[in-house]
């Protein structure tokens, strides 16, 4: 366990070494978030409430939506695992008493925490000053949001690792990165919250693991889930995380087993 | 002495998908793939005792890296058995990993973006090395290989020679019982090669760490490894001491005599004249029992010799002779 903490720590510190990037990234993030908020403001066009959702709620949703996806990068996980398997660099990792996908995830978690602290939080505060942002619906909802955020990060990285492992069989991780982005945009609720989805698409999207990355954390903050629902959905999310972790473990065993038997 | 590695009639065959030309060919290999078998290692057996230093030598594609990979547990043999420290490596990979060190000349195990010292620290955390032991090892190895000047520098800024020294130190930090090196001196300049060789020889001697190294560079073997295993076309062709190989092949020594005045053609019975440049005459001494004194006695007094140079057969020649003889002896 100490080793994985060390990987996360080192991921955090390496990011710190590229301080100059912070300003460029911060600017990029700001433009992105302003654009998202501007789109919703334009759509509402003076109407106070659409489909039972107020503009203020929508702006808050747009800001919270980046809490995980703005900090965490799936590319490094998908690309890192896929690349190591294809080039045979994975051999080096098979020589160490370490679980390779877990290593990739741990170091990316470190980098995500760095971006969250130095990019996401400042951006959200800055934009919130302009457009206003709703506080969590209650203390309970606020606390649950933190738990959901951690779960969101875990699900996000486990899905990315799964995609990276699939790349071993498909021999290209590029298309998988595109697919992952498309799925995130649509099924995580990053572009449009599920309550604007036509049924039954909305109902289906609520059941898929992507929903726990953006939709559920934001919905919890806004108080659109009752406390009982908050706990129940959290349990289901944990179930998804466990299933994904099992999938990663299984695929890793098969992929690394194939490298070991066939020599990559 | 205890055998730390036992390799018994090990073979490794790779399945390579056959490729057919054209679109139809690509379709064919997709629907009904056919494979050609490539034998990388064929029926190789040897044992290595604790504390030995063994050079594993062979031309490109002779199956050296494949053998290293099977001994470290990242490849499974097609047939035969490998035993390292009493275990089958690929079945107990994690456990073996803690007890061996591996260095790949062509693949870095250091973290590219991090200073060398940070890579070492991560290594300490991965292997749970006790703090005192770690500090002690790091101090000793860093001193021997002169790492201090660049410990704080990021790995990507290091020269190849510096990087390789760091790789070797890292592989030793967790006190492995066996150190595997796959072409550790490849691409290094003479000074760096020399530093690496002296260090490995010392680690082997002082700490009793068993060393197995593959190489193209015969000088590596000469300085580090008393024992030599040679492979060619996947098969083991020689296993024994370098000296034995040399005497078995009886490679000739080369003698150059420089005279003050040209003695004219000077054939000898103790040595064969190979080139005659007047003042400078080149001989080959083919028999081991002929000494320099014998040759000079035969040259006789009255001819003034300005300079004498006697060259021992170098290992490259020994091995070249070996492979040449093999290839002519065994019809392909």
Image (cartoon, coloured by chain):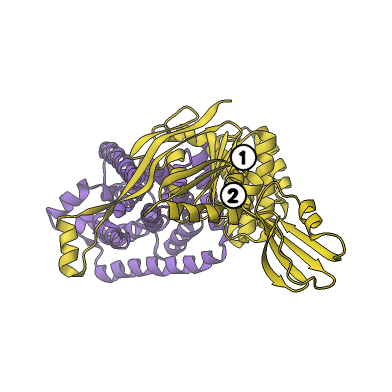
Chain colours: A purple, B yellow
The crowd level at tag 1 (other Cα within 10 Å; few <14, some 14-19, many 20+) is: many
Numbered circle sitting on residue A11: none
> Residue at label 1?
B173
Label 2 – label 1 distance at C-alpha: 10 Å
Relative side of B283 to A87, left or right: right
- Percent x, y for residue B283? 69, 62
Farthest left residue in view? A200
Q: Which subunit holds the residue at mark 1?
A: B
- Taking depth in this image into account, of B37 and A47 the one nearest to the observer is B37
Residue at (67%, 69%) from the top-left corner? B275
- Taking depth in this image into account, of B53 and B46 the one nearest to the observer is B46
Q: Quick one: SS at disc 1?
A: loop
- Which of the two labelled residues, at mark 2 and mark 1, occupies the earlier sequence position? 2
The crowd level at tag 2 (other Cα within 10 Å; few <14, some 14-19, many 20+) is: many
Give the position of the C terminus of chain B as an image quadrant.
Answer: bottom left
The answer to whether residue B118 is visible is: no
Q: Is residue A53 above or below residue B70?
A: below
- Taking depth in this image into account, of A16 and B172 the one nearest to the observer is B172
Residue at (33%, 52%) from the top-left corner? A164
């Amino acid at each position: 366990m100490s080793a994985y903490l060390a990987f996360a720590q080192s991921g955090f510190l390496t990011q710190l070494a590229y301080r100059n990037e912070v300003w460029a990234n911060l600017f990029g993030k700001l433009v992105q978030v302003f654009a998202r908020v501007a789109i919703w403001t334009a759509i509402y066009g003076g109407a106070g409430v659409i489909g039972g959702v107020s503009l203020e709620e929508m702006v808050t949703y747009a800001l919270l939506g980046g809490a995980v996806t703005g900090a965490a990068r799936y590319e490094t996980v998908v690309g890192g695992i896929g690349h190591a398997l294809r080039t045979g660099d994975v051999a080096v990792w098979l020589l160490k008493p370490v679980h390779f996908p877990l290593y990739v995830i741990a170091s990316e978690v470190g980098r995500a925490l760095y971006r969250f602290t130095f990019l996401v939080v400042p951006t959200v505060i800055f934009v919130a000053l302009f457009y206003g942002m709703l506080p969590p619906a209650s203390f309970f909802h606020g606390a649950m949001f933190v738990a959901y955020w951690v779960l969101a990060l875990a699900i996000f990285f486990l899905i990315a690792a799964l995609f990276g492992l699939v790349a071993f069989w498909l021999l290209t991780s590029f298309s998988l990165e595109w697919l992952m982005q498309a799925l995130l945009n649509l099924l995580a609720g990053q572009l449009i919250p599920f309550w604007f989805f036509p049924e039954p698409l909305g109902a289906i999207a609520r059941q898929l693991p992507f929903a726990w990355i953006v939709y559920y954390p934001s919905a919890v903050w806004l108080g659109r889930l009752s406390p009982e629902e908050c706990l129940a959905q959290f349990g289901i999310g944990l179930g998804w995380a466990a299933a994904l972790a099992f999938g990663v473990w299984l695929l890793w065993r098969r992929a690394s087993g194939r490298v070991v038997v066939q020599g990559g | 002495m205890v055998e730390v590695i036992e390799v018994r009639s090990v073979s490794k065959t790779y399945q390579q998908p056959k490729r057919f030309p054209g679109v139809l060919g690509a379709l064919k290999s997709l629907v009904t793939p056919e494979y050609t078998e490539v034998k990388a290692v064929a029926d190789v057996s040897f044992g290595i005792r604790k504390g030995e230093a063994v050079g594993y030598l062979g031309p490109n594609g002779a199956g050296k890296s494949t053998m290293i990979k099977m001994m470290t547990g990242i490849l499974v043999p097609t047939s035969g058995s490998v035993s390292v420290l009493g275990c089958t490596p690929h079945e107990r990979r994690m456990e073996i990993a803690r007890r061996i060190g591996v260095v790949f000349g062509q693949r870095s195990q250091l973290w590219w973006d991090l200073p060398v010292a940070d890579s070492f620290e991560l290594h300490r955390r991965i292997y749970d090395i006790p703090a005192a032991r770690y500090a002690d090892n790091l101090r000793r190895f860093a001193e021997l290989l002169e790492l201090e000047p660049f410990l704080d520098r990021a790995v990507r800024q290091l020269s190849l020679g510096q990087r390789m020294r760091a790789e070797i130190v890292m592989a030793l930090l967790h006190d492995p019982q066996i150190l595997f090196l796959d072409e550790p001196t490849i691409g290094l300049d003479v000074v760096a090669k020399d530093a690496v060789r002296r260090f490995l020889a010392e680690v082997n001697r002082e700490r009793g760490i068993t060393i197995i190294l593959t190489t193209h560079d015969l000088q590596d073997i000469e300085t580090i490894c008393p024992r030599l295993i040679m492979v060619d076309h996947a098969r083991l062709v020689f296993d024994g001491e370098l000296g034995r190989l040399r005497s078995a092949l009886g490679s000739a020594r080369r003698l150059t005599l420089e005279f003050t005045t040209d003695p004219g053609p000077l054939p000898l019975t103790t040595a064969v004249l190979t080139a005659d440049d007047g003042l400078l005459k080149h001989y080959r001494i083919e028999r081991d029992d002929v000494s320099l004194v014998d040759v000079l006695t035969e040259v006789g007094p009255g001819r003034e010799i300005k300079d004498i140079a006697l060259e021992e057969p170098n290992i490259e020649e020994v091995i070249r002779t070996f492979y040449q003889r093999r290839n002519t002896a065994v019809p392909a």
